[in-house]
Image: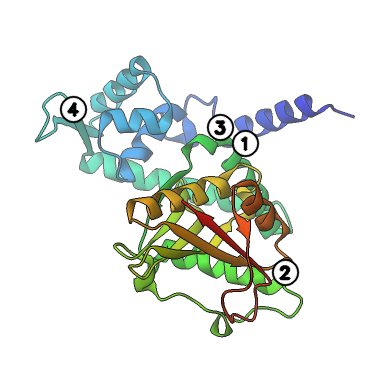
Amino acid sequence: MLDPVSRVRRFNRAVTSAVGALDNSFLGRGRPLGAARVLNAIGHGHADVSGIRDYLGLDSGLMSRLLRSLEDEGLIETTAHKDDARRRIIRLTPAGRREFNAYEALSNRQAEDFLARHAQRETLLAAMDMIASVLRHDGIALHEADPRSDEARYCLGAYYAELARRFSHGFDVKLSRDPDAKDMVRPRGTFIVAMSDGLPLGCVGLKGSGAEQAEIKRLWVAPAARGLGLGRRLMEAAENAARELGIAVLRLDTNSALAEAGQLYRKSGWTEIPRFNDDPYPDLFFEKRL
């Protein structure tokens, strides 16, 4: 039997080989993976040189060589930022856009081929999401979003579906005290989403009324990102937003079926209090003074 470290290294070798990371001609387009990744980043809207370097985790020397090779091919153009001449902005040329589109088509076909190798597609995708979340842990970013946005709806839909699976009598959001969107946008409250390379991994809402008391609602972390401390990060972000809005007391409710949520609240300084609403689903109630 392989030990854990050997299994990780086996996985690394498999991925390196499968994606063609060591090929001189990635996906048969005549350039290595590094140059293709830079082209991909630009095609997906990354325009600032320093931003692309940080996104891809490249050092300045390698980034300069890759950009020079793409310029020599006539695939990109570099200009100075209109407000800061020290910053360089990159865009694709028409030839670069055609090459980007070719990579997109080939990468999509490669991804479909990977998925076709396993009968349980969703299980395979869930494993990939978990691995990507672990590997890109430092890249998980929190930002405030409109609770009616696509990314927020994705998180809330996944949250409601999980409650329906875990509650003994199911879950119907129409029976719950579902907060109005206007109560989770500034200056009353906020809605925070955790994103990793385009995939929503978690959310939390701060439901306010303009008074000094508000509620934390809809804390959810995707299964792929659990165990990474994301729930605590989301709660801290919501508490910090509450302080900015002049909110002195926070409350929340949860169900004892969500044992991990109760643990998080108790470890984060929340105090259990008597029931404060008539929502049929929660059976645990907490408060925290900021």
Q: Between disc 1 and disc 2, whose residue precedes?
A: 1
Q: Between disc 1 and disc 4, whose residue precedes?
A: 1
Q: Residue at x 68, y 57 (%)?
A: 262
Rendered location of residue 20, percent (x, y): 56, 32
Up-down: is 27 above or below 175? above
Residue receiving disc 2: 166
Structural distance between the alpha carbons of marks 3 and 4: 33 Å
Q: Between disc 2 and disc 3, whose residue precedes?
A: 3
Rendered location of residue 263, percent (x, y): 69, 52
Residue receiving disc 3: 20
Structural distance between the alpha carbons of marks 2 and 4: 51 Å
Image quadrant where residue 133 sits: top right
The answer to whether any part of residue 207 appears in the image is yes
User: In this orientation, which residue lies closer to the viewer: 102 or 136?
Assistant: 136
Structural distance between the alpha carbons of marks 1 and 4: 36 Å
- Tell me: 14 left or right of 82: right
Rendered location of residue 124, percent (x, y): 68, 52
Q: Between disc 3 and disc 4, whose residue precedes?
A: 3
* SS of the residue under disc 2: helix
Residue receiving disc 1: 18
* SS of the residue under disc 1: helix
Structural distance between the alpha carbons of marks 1 and 2: 37 Å
Q: Amino acid at mark 4?
A: Arg
Up-down: is 139 above or below 256? above
Up-down: is 45 above or below 209? above
Q: Amino acid at mark 2?
A: Arg
Rendered location of residue 289, percent (x, y): 49, 54
